[in-house]
Image (cartoon, rainbow, N blue to C red):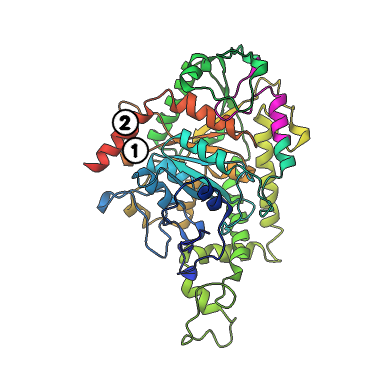
């Protein structure tokens, strides 16, 4: 919710609604002197992968027959950044709703670890999955905003408490990693600090300029995990080529590519589309036109023998929201709960265990995983996979898609959401043989262990964004949009 601006979730059921309080995120932005200039379009209540399910009309990248999908559900935020209307934008990421639009629009989209940024004032879709995300044109802007918003909020029961944040900090310290804003120094990688102090004396608030970082960045070599399960047959050749080129670039820098297995990834998408609609059906039950929602039409009667608000909800909720409410209500019913919802919760735990089994940095809030992989030859620091299996589709090609075909777009983003992990989507390195045009946008996703958000951001900023023709590719895309 935003003071002075409507908060409708792109839904007819909240048409004209303005909250009487402000979200913690918006309050922190205003206190920092950042202007909030407006709200953007999106999929209704965050339910969609292409920002086409809105009471105010679809969002699209371009016009006419060649208009591309901007991704969803935060497609409006991504388009505002991509078209330089704003420097940064806020979105909510439940199963990829910040990362997918970033991949489709050539921007940077970051989903932090669950609980790092307050959800107070965020209208919920699925409470256990919703995360406030950041979209910008570069990782540096994302890092600056994340530092501003990464605070405990007593008003949000899911916000990481100071004790938990201290445990994350301590786990990183024991890993001999500096918790600085711009650089993570590691003693066991033959790294030499450029300055007057030794490695052991680097302070948490040190700022290391980018030019100095480059002088020794290659000394901090990472083990990069590449999951076999993400190399699916349905992946578009352009996406596969961009993935291979990104990995090749990292090998040239001295990083090690490690094949890994995340066996339960194939179950993650199905589990997500059981859990998220189940939580949504509960969260949206209050919109009945009596307690919540846009005022009822006194001239329109509900079903005489039906529930009080049957017609009202049918008239004001969009088709996709109704579909997910029905799906969630079914999976929570007494006859189906054990076979669907409970099983999906078990799959979610297995997905989380898969990630814990491959990361060298154990989950800082789960003591039994903290050092289990630190000496393993197969342990990795980060995972790199595509954000989406295809480049952005044309809007006209979406018209004949079934809901299930649309849901498949989230196949690479959902696993990190189920596990609550930090993940960022960054435009892939541009191949000279592949023009940087909107229909060729490809995003690469960097995933880290829970709480290791700064490693994800620093690696992306210096080892990917800082070493490829990122700015050149973005300028080329922007100039072609204006032609």
- Residue 135 visible in image: yes
Question: How far apart are labels 2 and 1 at the CA level?
Answer: 8 Å
Report the front residue among 146 and 36. Answer: 36
| Residue 7 within the segment the image draws in magenta | no
Whether residue 231 is visible, yes or no, is: no
- The residue beneath circle 1 is 440
Residue range corresponding to the magenta coloring: 167-187
Residue shown at 47% from the left, 65% from the top: 11
Out of 71 and 239, give the one closest to the viewer. Answer: 71
Q: Residues within 10 Å of mark 1 (few under 14, many from 20)?
A: many
Q: The residue tagged with tag 2: helix, strand or loop?
A: loop
Instruction: Estimate how packed mark 2 is, as few (under 14), some (14 to 19) or many (20 or more) residues with alpha carbons within 10 Å.
Output: few
User: What secondary structure is found at the residue carrying circle 1?
Assistant: helix
Q: Nearer the viewer, residue 92 or 315?
A: 92
Q: State if disc 1 and disc 2 touch (CB < 8 Å).
A: yes
Q: Is residue 175 magenta?
A: yes
Q: In the shown orientation, is residue 395 left or right of residue 350?
A: left
Image quarter of residue 136 = top left
Where residue 410 appears, as percent x and y from the top left, is 50, 46
Q: Is residue 298 above or below residue 83?
A: below
**Of 384 and 76, which appears nearest the observer?**
76
Instruction: Give the x, y percent position of residue 2.
Output: 51, 58
Label whose residue precedes the other's in the sequence (2 or 1): 2
Disc 2: which residue: 434
Q: What residue do we see at 74% from left, 32% from top?
A: 369
The percent position of residue 282, horizontal first and vertical second, equals 63, 64
């Amino acid at each position: 919710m935003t003071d002075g601006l409507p908060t409708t979730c792109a839904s007819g059921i909240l048409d004209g609604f303005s909250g009487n309080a402000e979200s913690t995120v918006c309050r922190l932005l205003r206190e920092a002197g950042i202007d909030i200039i407006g709200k953007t379009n999106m999929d209704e209540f965050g339910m969609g992968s292409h920002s086409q399910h809105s009471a105010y009309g679809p969002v699209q990248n371009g016009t006419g027959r060649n208009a591309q999908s901007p991704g969803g559900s935060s497609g409006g935020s991504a388009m505002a950044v991509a078209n330089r209307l704003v420097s940064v934008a806020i979105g909510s990421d439940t199963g990829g709703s910040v990362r997918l639009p970033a991949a489709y629009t050539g921007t940077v989209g970051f989903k932090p670890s669950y609980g790092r940024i307050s959800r107070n004032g965020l209208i919920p879709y699925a409470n256990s999955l919703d995360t406030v995300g950041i979209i910008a044109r570069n990782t540096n802007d994302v890092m600056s905003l994340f530092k501003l918003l990464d605070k405990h909020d007593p008003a949000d029961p899911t916000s990481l408490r100071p004790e938990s944040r201290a445990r994350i900090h301590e786990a990183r310290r024991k890993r001999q990693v500096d918790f600085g804003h711009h650089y993570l120094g590691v003693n066991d990688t033959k790294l030499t600090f450029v300055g007057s102090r030794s490695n052991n004396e680097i302070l948490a608030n040190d700022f290391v300029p980018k030019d100095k970082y480059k002088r020794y960045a290659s000394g901090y070599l990472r083990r990069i995990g590449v999951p076999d399960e993400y190399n699916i047959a349905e992946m578009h050749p352009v996406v596969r080529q961009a993935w291979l080129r990104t990995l090749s670039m990292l090998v040239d820098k001295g990083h090690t590519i490690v094949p890994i297995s995340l066996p339960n990834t194939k179950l993650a998408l199905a589990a997500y589309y059981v859990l998220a609609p189940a939580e949504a059906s509960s969260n949206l039950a209050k919109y009945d036109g009596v307690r919540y929602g846009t005022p009822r039409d006194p001239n329109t009667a509900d079903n005489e023998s039906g529930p009080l608000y049957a017609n009202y909800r049918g008239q004001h909720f969009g088709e996709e929201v109704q579909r997910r409410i029905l799906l969630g209500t079914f999976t929570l019913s007494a006859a189906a709960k054990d076979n669907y919802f409970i099983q999906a919760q078990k799959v979610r735990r297995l997905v989380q265990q898969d990630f814990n089994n491959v990361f060298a940095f154990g989950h800082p809030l789960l003591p039994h995983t903290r050092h289990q992989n630190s000496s393993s030859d197969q342990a990795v620091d980060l995972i790199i996979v595509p954000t989406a299996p295809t480049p952005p589709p044309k809007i006209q090609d979406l018209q004949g898609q079934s809901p299930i075909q649309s849901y498949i777009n989230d196949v690479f983003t959902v696993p990190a959401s189920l596990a609550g992990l930090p993940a960022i989507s960054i435009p892939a390195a541009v191949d000279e043989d592949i023009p940087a045009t909107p229909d060729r946008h490809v995003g690469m996703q960097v995933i880290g262990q829970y709480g290791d958000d700064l490693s994800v951001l620093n690696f992306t900023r210096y080892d990917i964004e800082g070493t490829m023709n990122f700015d050149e590719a973005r300028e080329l895309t922007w100039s072609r949009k204006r032609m």
